[in-house]
Image (cartoon, grey):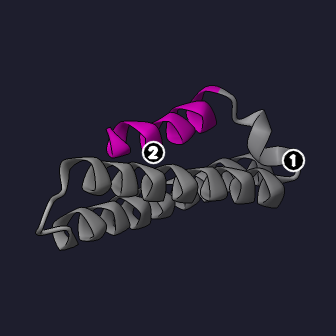
Amino acid sequence: MVSFFCLISIIILLKYPKLVQNNSFYNHYIIFILKVLFISMFIYIFIYNFSISNYKIFIISGGFNLTFFHVLEGYLTRKILLKDETKT
């Protein structure tokens, strides 16, 4: 579920590369904040509702997903920006 949510931003970047060109830092910042809020909310609700005693695996998994997909999104953003720079 968390990975799917993180993939949504990457799919949007691939589908609409113009979003990267228009104030890319602001768009990247908003997507990052939404991912952090969603992942932390998902982990909290899952741990709280199911009373899981070994909660560390969920926190580590959420942190790994966030880091991996954030780096992947940054790589794609960089690739799109460099591709557009070479065209001009």
- Circle 1 Cα neighbour tier, 10 Å, few/some/many (<14 / 14–19 / ≥20): few
Residue 61: x and y, percent?
A: 25, 63
Is disc 2 in contact with disc 1, using a CB cutoff of under 8 Å? no
In this figure, which residue is indicated by the disc labeled 2?
Answer: 6
Horizontal side of residue 86 vs 71, given as left or right: right
| Quadrant of the rendering where the N terminus is positioned | top left
Residue 44: x and y, percent?
A: 38, 57
38 or 11: nearer the viewer: 38
> Which element carries disc 2, helix, strand or loop?
helix
Residue at the (30%, 55%) spot, across then down: 48
Horizontal side of residue 3 vs 66, given as left or right: left
Q: Quadrant of residue 54?
A: bottom left
In this figure, which residue is indicated by the disc labeled 1?
Answer: 88
Residue 26: x and y, percent?
A: 82, 56
In the image, the segment drawn in magenta is 1-15
35 or 10: nearer the viewer: 35
Instruction: Kindly report which numbered mark, 2 or 1, lies closer to the viewer in this rendering.
Output: 2
